[in-house]
Every structure is written in C-alpha cells, then in structure tokens.
Amino acid sequence: MTERREGPSPGRPWLVLGIFLLAAIWIAWLRQPALTTPVWNVDEGITAAIADEILAGGVPYRDATDLRAPLTYYLYAAVFAIAGDNNMDAIHVTHTLLVVATALLVLLIGRRIDGIVAGGWSLWLYAALACCLFNPMDNLALHTEWPLAFCSALGAWLFLTGHLRGGLGWFIGTGIFYGLAALSKQPALLDFGAPLALQAWCLLTGPRPESGRRWREAAALVIGFALPLLLTVLYFSARGALDDFVFYTWTYNTRYYVPEVPLAVRFPTIRVPLELLHHFAPSLLALLVLSVLVTVYYFFFRPAHRRGDRAVRLLLAPVWLLGSLGATTLSGRGFEHYSIQLLAPASLVAGQLLGPLTAWSLVGLRRLQWRLAPALLVSGALIATVTVQLHHCLSYRAAIQPHKDPSVAMAKIVREVTTREDRLFVWGFYSDFHPLSDRLPASRYVHGAFLTGLIPWTNLGRDTSYAIVPESMDKLLTDLEKHRPRVIVDASQALNRQFQNYSPEKFPPFLAYLQQHYIEYEPQRSIPRGWFHFYLRKDPAASAPVDDNTPRAPVGILKNITQDFSGRAKIVIHGSDPSGQLQQLGICVGTGDMHTVTFPPAAERLLVISIPYPATAGDQAPVIRIVARSTDGRHSISAPQTWTASSEQPKDLHLTTAAGPVPVDQVSAAFKPVPVEQEGQAGWLCHAYTALRFPLPAGPSRLRFGHGLAPGAYEKISEHTDGVEFIVQYQPQRGSPRVLYRRLLNPAENAADRGLQSGEVEVPPPHPGDSLVLITHPGPAYNTAFDWSYWTTPMLEPVATVPAHQP
C-alpha cells in the first residue's frame, strides 16, 4: 500500500542510497574550490562577525546588527564552537553538507511524487543548479538562502509523508521546519504558502468525513510554524533584545530596505532566475514551462488528479516554485543568490516531467511498434540534456579561481598590532576583516549601512541621510568608548557596496572621535593603494622624554604637513631604528601634549597624526617635536620641527567666474605654484602637497576643471610618481569640510590616468565666508617624489538649482 502510493517504481533502498552517494560525491567535487578562499563575499564576513559576537556572549541585533533573520548567525556560531573561532574552512564544509542534505531531500520528495526515476532526475538537476548556476562568489558563499532551502525541503518532505502515512506529528514537524526557514530568511514565509494552500485545497475538495482530520492537520501546520517563532521571540525578550530584533528583522526592512525600490521595479526582477536558467541550459527553462503546462492539463482535465493526496503530489512542487519565485522579487534587488530558494522546487517540477518521459521512452525502446521512433527522439533529447549539463558543470568548475580579496593580506596588519582580546572596528562595508583577523567587533555596527543610510545598489549619487537609523551615531560612539578598539580600519574607499560616498569626513562626530583618539598607521602598506587606512589607538597621556643623547637612538623625521584650512592638519612622520627595535613613535605638541602609539618592534614606521592647526595665514603654528622609543629603553626627541608652507599668493592664480576672476586668498604648499601650459590650456603646477583656497561668490554654481600630472612625472621606468590624489573641497566658515571630488591618478601604472583629465562638481550655495579648496595630495603613501601635478584654470559657472546646502 505504501509503495504504491509513493508513485511508480519507488526503487529499492539500496538503489536510492547508491544514487544519493554518487550525487554526494559529485556535489562535493564540484564545490571543493570553496576551500580555496576564506571569505567569498561580504555577506559571509558579516555573518561570521555576528557569530563570533554570539560566542563571546553577545546577542544579535543588540550587540551585532544586520537586517537578516537570525538562524544563519547561529549556524555559523555552532560551527565555530565545534571547529574553532572563525574557521571558515569548516563553514564551507558545512555549506557542502547542507547542499548534499538538501539534494537527498529532493531525491526523496521526487520519489514520493512520481517514483525513483523522477526523483533521480530531480536530484541530478538540483546538483547541477546548486553547484554551477550562479557566479562563484554567490555559489560558494554560505548565504542565508542555503539553510532556508534545506529547511523548506525538509518541511516539504514531512508534508508529503504526513499525507501518505497520516499522523499530526508529521504536520507539526512540517510547520517547525518552515518556521526555521523563515528564521533563516524572511521571504521563506512564501514557501510556507505551498503546504497551506494544498491543505486548504484538500479541505475544500475532500470528502466530508475527512474534514475533521484535515482541519487538525492544518492546525498542526500552523502550530508547528509558530513554535520556533515564539521561542525566538521569548529568547530575545529574555536577553533584553526584543525591540532590536523586531526593528532590524522587520521594521528596518519594511520602512527602509524594501521601499527603496519602487513596487513597479520589483516585479521585473523575476527575470533574474529565468536569465540564469537560460544561460545555464535553455532546454531546462523550456522543460520547466512544459512541465507546468502538463501539470495544469492533468489538474484541470483529469479529475482524478484534483482530489486528496494525488493533488498534493501533483501540485506541491509547482505551487512551491510559484511562492519561491514571488519571494525573489520582494526586495527588487535581483541578486543572484536570492534564486537559491528556487532550486529545489524547480528541479522537482522538471523531474515530474522527465520521470514519465524516461519511463515512456524506455517502454517504447523495448517494443518494436509505432512508439519506437518518438522514443528514440525522446531518449536522444534526454541524453543530450545530461551531456550539455555535464559539460557545463565541468567547464564551470575548471574556470573557478580563488577570490582575490585584498583584505586577506591587509588583515595581517590588524593581527600584527593586536591580540585576540583586542576588538576591531571597521568603517565601511568590509566585515571580512573580523573573521580574517580573528578579532571581535568593537561595535554593534559590523557594517556601515545603518550609520550612513547606505542601501546597497540604490545609493549611488544620492543623499541617503533619510535612511540613517535614528541614534545610530550616538550608539556607535558609546560602543567605541566601551570597547576602546585597538584598531579602527577605514575601508570607506574600498569598492564593497559602493561605500566611497561615505568617508569619515562626512560624519563629523565619528571623525572627531577618530582624530582625538587614533593615529593613522603605515598608510603606504594599503593594497590596493588608498583602499584601507589603519588607525591605532593613542597611548595614554605621558610626559615627553628628556633628550639624553642616547647612542644610536631611534630617529624620527618630519615628512609632510597637509593643511587644508579646516582648522586641523595632518603631520606625517617617519621613524627608524637600525636595530629593528622601534616600538613607539609620535609627536609632542607645545610643551607636553603627547600623541604617540606603541606597536611591535620594527625597523621603521610611518604615522599620520591629526592635530589642531591654524586655518588662517599668519596665526602661530604649534611647536612640534618628534618622539621615538625602542624596546630596550633608547629614546629620542627631536628639535622643534618647521615646515615651509608658502603663504605667498601667486599672481594671476584665480578662479574664472561670470563676474570676473576670483583670486586665491590662501596657499598651503611646500613649493610655490608656478604657471604652466598643458595640452594648450593654461594652468598651475602644484607639486603635492598643495592646497589653494578661493572665496566663493554668492549663489549656486558648478565648477569645471582640468587636472593631471606632467609627463615627466611618469615617463621614466625607474623614477616616477606613485600617484597624486586630486581633491575639491567645500569649506564652510564654520564646520567640517565637505569633499566634492576625489580622484587618485597614478599614470605610471594606469595609462588611462595619463594626460589632461576633466572634472565637474556642483557647488552648494555658500554662506558668507565659505570657500572652495583645491588640493593636490601626495596619495596614501605620502610619497611626494615626482608628484608634478597641475590644475588648469578652474571655471565657476552659475546654475539654476543645486543640492541643498549642508553646513
């Protein structure tokens, strides 16, 4: 009785086991390249950081925030608890096991629906899609969708089994695992719609004597679904984090994240999984459409298939697929990994057609009758389907390359100056630093979205302050003061999530905290250049040492002072010790204001220290002396350092405006700007570092300018510039500067940076006393050699409208 109701040819257990083991080996081999990269994308970094905080006694959303449901965080935490802190290899092995387990469930569900042949086809398709459909960074990362897929598949198998065997326990189990799917990712609510809809259909169409049983089964489904959700609410409530849990998993998504994409734009994202399938195998997409049409035919034109358990077997996969397809469009983002939710039902829908087709063709091949010719055609098509997908899988695996995440190398800097007890804060969208450096987050904000209003892929060129989570900056500063992270990494200029618009300069409270408590460490070691800035927490206040002329003491020299008229300057110093024992470096300002940091013994180190500095020419600059210490007690303090910064106003250096030229009113430069002509345009050679300040005329305007480096700066192979950063900065009379334009040109390494470059920015309507500052900066390494940079005469044009003034 049981075997017959499972569908035709359910297959013996040894056959089912053999098919599964072959598939498991195939999946493991296809996914083996996951072990070549510690962190495949930013989502893995975020989840690992939150899992690490959980193991340290923290609670998600209260102590480590993100917008996703919590199950995957606890899965990572469980793996780390067993395999060791931040063991990402163990995460990727667990990921493979999840895919293998889901593949087994797909085989068992397909077998329940229409026999072992349909189950085998569903398994084959699922293995291929789950391992080769997406780009490797989505495919090989353990996203929230993979636990969701497993829990939904297990719920579907329990639901079918319950209809086959009876018993409320199966339906309670069904609800529990669909509830866990929703706790992995919120759109799994639509997956749960499949068993609810089918149970409702059984209630509506079943015999009256069965209605009581069907109602009890429906109640068991709902109770089971509610159980893990209720326990989760009780857990977060007991830990004092219920409000945070509700806000980040529900309120933030419904108030900020999802509405960011208009409703009319969300629905077209349904094309993403269709395009993926078409690229993978167009025949598979056609097969899915045909299978759905066949299902509709059987349902509407074969009355026997509209009743009871037969309807459940026929409709489960198509209805499940429909709900999952709707879930992929909810946010309108169209990320590839959202389609992971579709793989199991899509494979089952296709298997429902391939199974009967295979059986029909086998019968036709055994009998010499009219079926032989079409059976041969069908068999050829099936073999071609397998061959094409096999070729695709082999080609896909051969093409996988390790993900070259620059934070892998950069995390070594964090590890060299910290211990496991030290916490780390990353400003930006680069949580990879936490698992790669094995350091706990120093703030609940493990990424910058809630602090800045950044909503991925909709934030380009926009003011996103409306999406900043209320009080988030105050909470960040409270967290930082509580944990006092040894290192802060500014990753705002890295490419992750287009965070370049959110530099610390645009967030004065955070910038002020950074300037007060931290010193930039080894900026020249950033790879790629300028992506990452590392800040060490300053040493506790101490008195300046007395220079006792200790033999062979470590030496510190002043390399640069960058002064942009904002009231602060960056003092660039280099320390060295021939014995490799340099341990402390910094400056003494005035009579005893110390700014030093301590680090592991080294031969040399470069620091950038931000201090208050006169914004107006003629004011008294502070007296600066450089302090250096070694591990064996040797120390030195330099004589007062001076920096030649020209205050002379070069003749004819001006902005061109409709009302006439506006001359520069202040210059900060080691070398006086000199007039040049580049590519037929008049301009000024401003060797980095140079800052030019121009008073702004009233009214909104647009600035057009040219900039570049002289050919002699990069033409020689052995001696050339390492790049210059060109900055246009709006400087209000009161308040922090606002960067309008920033571009690093490195023509020695990038041919596109050679020659005259052009730029254009909108300038906010100024208040009286506001100014515009044009800066040529020596770049992240502060190396000024061959930095022969120039501006062509900038032109300020009036415009009708510009963005609102932001003081």
Image (cartoon, helix red, strand yellow):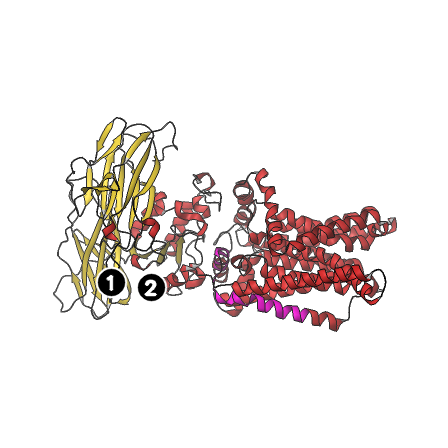
Q: Quadrant of the N terminus?
A: bottom right
Badge 2 amino acid: Val
377 drawn magenta: no
Q: Position of residue 154 (x, y in %)?
A: 68, 60
Q: Quadrant of the C terminus?
A: top left
Residue 221 to residue 791: above or below: below
Q: Which mark is residue 417?
A: 2
Q: SS of the residue at dot 2?
A: helix
Distance CA(mark 2)–CA(mark 1): 12 Å
* Other residues around mark 1 within 10 Å, as few (<14) / some (14–19) / many (≥20): many
Question: Along the line of sight, which residue is nearer the eye, 630 or 381?
Answer: 381
Quarter of image, res 287: bottom right
47 drawn magenta: yes
Q: Residue at x 33, y 45 (%)?
A: 742
Q: Which mark is residue 464?
A: none
Q: Position of residue 749 (x, y in %)?
A: 32, 55
Residue 625 to residue 266: above or below: below
Mark 1 highlights which residue?
Answer: 584
Q: Position of residue 554 (x, y in %)?
A: 19, 65
| Residue 281 visible here | yes
Q: SS of the residue at dot 1?
A: strand
* Region rendered in magenta: 20-48
* Other residues around mark 2 within 10 Å, as few (<14) / some (14–19) / many (≥20): some
Could you tell whether 74 is left or right of 6 in the image? left
Question: Along the line of sight, which residue is nearer the eye, 104 or 518?
Answer: 104
Could you tell whether 279 is left or right of 757 in the image? right
Residue 641 to residue 775: above or below: below
Residue 242 to residue 394: above or below: above
Badge 1 amino acid: Gln
